[in-house]
Each structure stands twice: as C-alpha cells, then as structure tokens.
Amino acid sequence: MTASLAHRGPGERAVIAAGTSVLGAARLHVTDPAAPSGPYTTLSGAVVATVNGEIWNHRELRGELAARGVSVPAGPDTAVVAPLYAAFGAPGLGRLRGMFAAAIHDARSGETVLARDRFGIKPLYYHAPARSTLRFASEPGALPRTGALDRDALRDYLVLGVVPAPRTLSRGVQKVPSGSAVVFGPHGRRSLCFAPPPPLRPGAAADPGAVRAALAQSVRRHLMGDAPMGVFLSGGLDSAAVAAFVREAGAPLRTFAMTFPGEGVYDEGALARRSAALLGAEHVEASLTAAELPELITACARHFGEPFGDSSALAVLALSRVAARHVTVVLTGTGADELFLGYRRYTLGAPPPGTRAAAHAAAALLPTSRRGALGTAGLLARKLAASCAVGDPAARYLERLAVVPAAWRARLLGDRAPAPVLTRVRDAFRGAPSFADGARAADLAVYLPDDLLAKEDRMTMACGLENRVPFLDDRVADLAGGLAAREHGGGKRLLRRALRGLLPRDIVRRRKHGFAVPVAEWLRGEAAHVVSDLLLAPGARLRDHLDGAAVDALATAHRRGDDGLGPAVYALVALEAALRHDG
C-alpha cells in the first residue's frame, strides 16, 4: 500500500506494527529531512500515529505538552500528533493548526482514529468491509476495489462533477469528512467533528489591519521547511497576495503560471507575467494545448482513483509537472474566494420578478463560448435561467453549481430524484442570515474540500510536489469567515483594503477571472476524437449506469455548437476514464 503512494512520498517508506495494527508512511522530504520518517510513537509506545501533511503550530504544542510533563519524541512537526492525542484524546486534534490526514492507533483503548484537517486540505480514504478489518490511505488507489457502484454518489457526481465526502463511487470505499474523525474500536464505529467551519460572530466588524497581519503570519508559517518553494500565480488578486507576502518574508520568490497559447480570454499568462514582474519574481510558465488532452485525461483518472469532472485539474497537473523540476512546495491562493466572498454567484439571492424570462432570452441570444467576448455572459445567463426555476435557496444554489443541467441529468439517470448532497447544502443554508452567507457555508462544506482542494492535492502530489494554502490558516479563516457577508462588502472589498500598499494598485483592483480550461472548444474541435473514443464507443462503461441514448444526445448537442454543455461532456469523459482505469 505504501509503495503505491511513492509519488506522494518519494523520499522513503516506513512501516510500524502496533499490536494488531500496522501503519505506514511514504515521506516527501520537506521539513527536517534527516529526521526519522515515521510513523511516530509516544515514548511509552502506547500511541502511534502516521501523518500526511504539516503542523504549523508544532512548536507551541511541544511547549504546552512539555509544561504538562509529556515528552515529544524527536522528529519533524508531525511527531507531535501521537503525544498530543495521548495527552488529550480526540479533543486534542482540535488544537492542531495545519493541513493533515492522520491515522492514530491507541493501544490503551484498542481504537484507531482517522482524522482530517479543518478544511479537508489533505485527503483520507478508508475501506472497512467488516468490523475487524480497516484499511486507510491518502488515495483510493491504495485500497481494494470492492463494492458495487454507489448510485447516490453517481447522482452527486452529475451535479458537482465530483463525489463529495463521505461517499466515493464505490460502495466499499469512503472519505473522512473535513474537520472530522472516524473512530474504529472494540465497540464499533463512531464519528465526531473536532474542527467545525468558522462560526459567524454577530456584530463583528471588518478589520483590514488584522486580516493583513494574519495573512502575513500565515504565509511565514507556510514557508516552514527545508525544501525549495514557489507560488502558483494566476492573473488575479489572491495568488499575487500570497506571492507578495512571500517576498515580504524575505524568502526567494519563484512563481509558476499556466498559459493556453492562442486561447484568448482563457489565457491569463500575460497578467500573471505582469504580476511576477511587478513583484520581482523568478517566473516560469507552462503551456497546455488540445494535443495534450488525451494523455492528461488518462493521467488524471490514474492519480485521482475516482471520477473527477473539473477540467481545470488538467492544467494543475501540467503546471505541477513543470514546477516540480524547480521546487518541492508550492503555495496557492485557494480559499480566498470562499472566505472573502469573491464569487459572483453569491449575489444570486432571490431572483427579482421577470429575471427568469430575461435570463432565458439572454441565454438564447448570447454565445456560450468563452473564446468570444460575450461568451462568459452567455454562460452566466444560462446558469441564471436554470437556477431561477428553483424556489428553495439551497436547491437554487446547487443548480447554479451544476455541471450537468437538471434536464440532462434526468435523461441520463431516468428520473428526477434530487442529489443526496442537497441535504448538506440545505444544512449550510439553515440559519444563514443571507443567501451569500448560506452559499459560502455550502462552499466551505462541499465545493472547497471536494473539488478545489482535492484537485490541488492530487495533481501536485502526483508530481511529488506539496501544495500549501495560506488563506486557510485558522486565524485568517476565523477573521474572514466569522464576518457576515454584509460586513465584507462586494467584490472582496475587505481583502482588497487589507492588501493596499502591499500590492500595486492595478493588481488590487483586478476583477475576478475564473480559472478555466477551453475544454468545451477542444472536445468539439481539435480533440473531438476523445469524445468518440470514450463516450460514443459501443463498449463504454458508463453506459452500464447511464442511459446510452441520452449520452449520445448530449454529445451531439455539444458537437453542434453548444459550449454550455462542455462541462457536462467533460464530466462524462472523466467518468468513463475513471471506470476504465478501475478495470
């Protein structure tokens, strides 16, 4: 199992027996490379832990434990987890500030605990077919392929393009939810949440100075390590802010950006290049063209080990391959849009009278290709028209996120039953003071961990590259996430105020530009054979689970010019690639 994860930890592998349990680790040399690779035990040997990730506050925790007379064995930051758990039990996990997936065996109780950080930065899968058997890993590819296809997971996948925790497409494998632990022991299985999302603080006021100070401290913490580091740089505000704080900390500034040659509005290369020049960075670019699509789709299916229908994963993988030649760690701006309300979709709310008719008219008239000047407006009009048809705010928001439109989902599945993930979205909206607050809570619970963070972790680690996200430091998250939407102001106003004087004015004022790959156009043009080879082949495996005539009709509608269906076609392509990889 550890050998199958060698790409995540090319340093060395180690395995340790603890009673009837065996724990393993494949280590990436980032912090204290000369230290033992783990798993790490307490001095008594009663508790052993294997940990993937980094613990930013390990020095503070070591001091706290020492004051209680608890010794921490030699090792890097993750060596603190076993003695922390020995001293405080599961509540001690809430003291960890970091990005981690941990498996902890406690010989005192006979329990094994699987725990995942607050925002789900690091992944953790498990396979527990019987009470006496438990297997766990950072990726599903290390686990047995057992269990029938989960129809509910497929329903969620067609909405989101990913399968949200705790499900996977296989009934035999599950994910630990973010901020939670699953405990296996003599008395069965139980779950607990030890690190909930940031709670709203009624009456709290925005403090740009506090936000800036917290971000500066977070970036300094995220520079912890003994390996070369860089920043993934887009043309936008968030990654530029991270790069600026790296420079302010006095660390070497290396930036990496993706370009799409000849793809117009998709290509942020020039903006990223300008940001890098303004910040004085050593800048490296990677490019992606339609010719690379087939190989990248296959590679994504192999490294995810489950279907993943967000096409931007292709670009992250291509960029990671280039960055890994230069650095071992990359920092990104992920999480800023969720915490500081940067998405335009947060402004949907209740549609005013007449909005649906106007959106339908705009959707019918405007193009849907982002290659054209009006393409983005056309795509937004279509999304708005679909979401206006739904009365429930949570269901309306989920439809705004939908990868496959509702009418096509009904044809593919043969029914209109709601996706199970709708329950989690409704939970997020419950008690929210506004639509924007509910939407943000839903994104923090589902979209951020199961799409954005899963994509970055899996694609960077496929190349032996560690991804870090300073915006998701607990202090930053509590400051920004604790403020109601009305306190932020539109367009990430609080964050922009916090960054004044740190970044050049033209970067601070840049509008949000979503990171997207021109896959809709490629799958209808230069890479159309991918659709024929994967979706339209008589032996396509997804036809065992979806209506074949509907698959054909969807592909045909896209081929005839409907770029708005590009994400849906790509999600089906990714699903078929994953099913073939599973054999």
Image (spheres, rainbow, N blue to C red):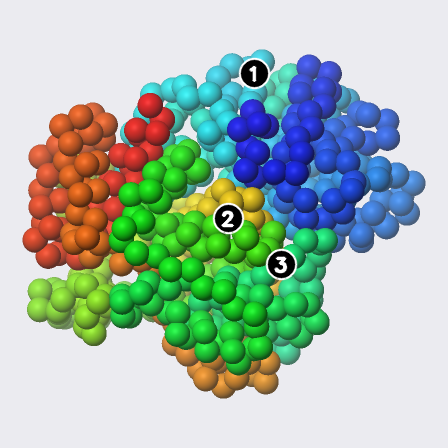
Pointer 3 residue: 229
Report if residue 380 is visible in the image: yes
Q: Spatial distance from mark 1 to mark 3, Cα to Cα?
A: 39 Å
Amino acid, disc 3: Met
Report if residue 418 is visible in the image: no
Amino acid, disc 1: Thr
From the viewer's perspective, is 284 left or right of 50?
left
From the viewer's perspective, is 407 left or right of 39?
left
Q: Which of 473 and 108 lies nearest the eye of the viewer?
A: 473
Identify the mark at residue 460; answer none if there is no mark: 2
SS category of the residue bearing label 1 = strand
Image coordinates for residue 367, horizontal then vertical, percent = 14, 66
Q: Residues within 10 Å of mark 1 (few under 14, many from 20)?
A: few
The residue at 49%/42% (across/down) is 462
Amino acid, disc 2: Thr
Pointer 1 residue: 133
Pick whichever of labels 2 and 3 is earlier in the sequence: 3
Mark 1 vs mark 3, foreground winner is 3
Name the image quarter holding the N terminus.
Answer: top right
Q: Quadrant of residue 251?
A: bottom right
